[in-house]
Image (tube, helix red, strand yellow):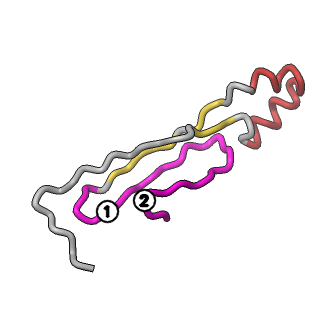
Amino acid sequence: MVQTPASFVLDKSQHNISVSCKKECYQDAVGIIPSHTDTMTAGNVLVGGVVGLAVDAASGAMNKYNDTNQISMVPIPACKPKPI
């Protein structure tokens, strides 16, 4: 859990990441940070061959996430935030 604005580092993985955003006076928002194959994978096949490709695929090393992701949150009309 982080408070926006925020940044964090994700380890490479073959799995997409589900994100849920909540803020007072805004509708909850959900999104997915997709994992996709890194462009350097083709070079790994030439250097490491099929074995290197299999290891990278199993470990998620050939995948990456986008550098930036945005999840839009819609304000709730007429909502008044609670005083702190």
Q: Are marks 1 and 2 in contact (CB under 8 Å)?
A: yes
Please check the rendered image and state whether residue 57 is part of the magenta-colored stretch, yes or no. Answer: no
* Quadrant in which the C terminus appears: bottom left
**Residue that mark 2 sits on:** 4
Which of the two residues, 64 or 82, is positioned nearer the viewer here?
Answer: 82
Could you say which disc has been placed on residue 32 in the image?
none
Residue placed furthest toward the bottom: 84
Segment tinted magenta in the rendering: 1-27
Depth-wise, is mark 1 or mark 2 nearer the camera? 2
Q: Quadrant of residue 61?
A: top right
4 with respect to 26 (left or right): right
**Picture coordinates of residue 44 (x, y %)?**
82, 26
Which of the two residues, 7 or 29, is positioned nearer the viewer here?
Answer: 7
Q: Residue at x 86, y 31 (%)?
A: 52
Residue type highlighted by circle 1: Lys
**Picture coordinates of residue 10 (x, y %)?**
63, 51
Please check the rendered image and state whether residue 11 is part of the magenta-colored stretch, yes or no. Answer: yes
Q: Residues within 10 Å of mark 1 (few under 14, many from 20)?
A: some
What kind of element bears circle 1? loop
Q: Earlier in the sequence, mark 1 or mark 2?
A: 2
**Residue that mark 1 sits on:** 23
Vertically, is 65 above or below 41?
below
Q: Quadrant of residue 81?
A: bottom left
- How far apart marks 1 and 2 lie (CA) works out to 10 Å
**Picture coordinates of residue 83 (x, y %)?**
22, 78
Q: Residue at x 49, y 57 (%)?
A: 6
**Picture coordinates of residue 79 (x, y %)?**
15, 64
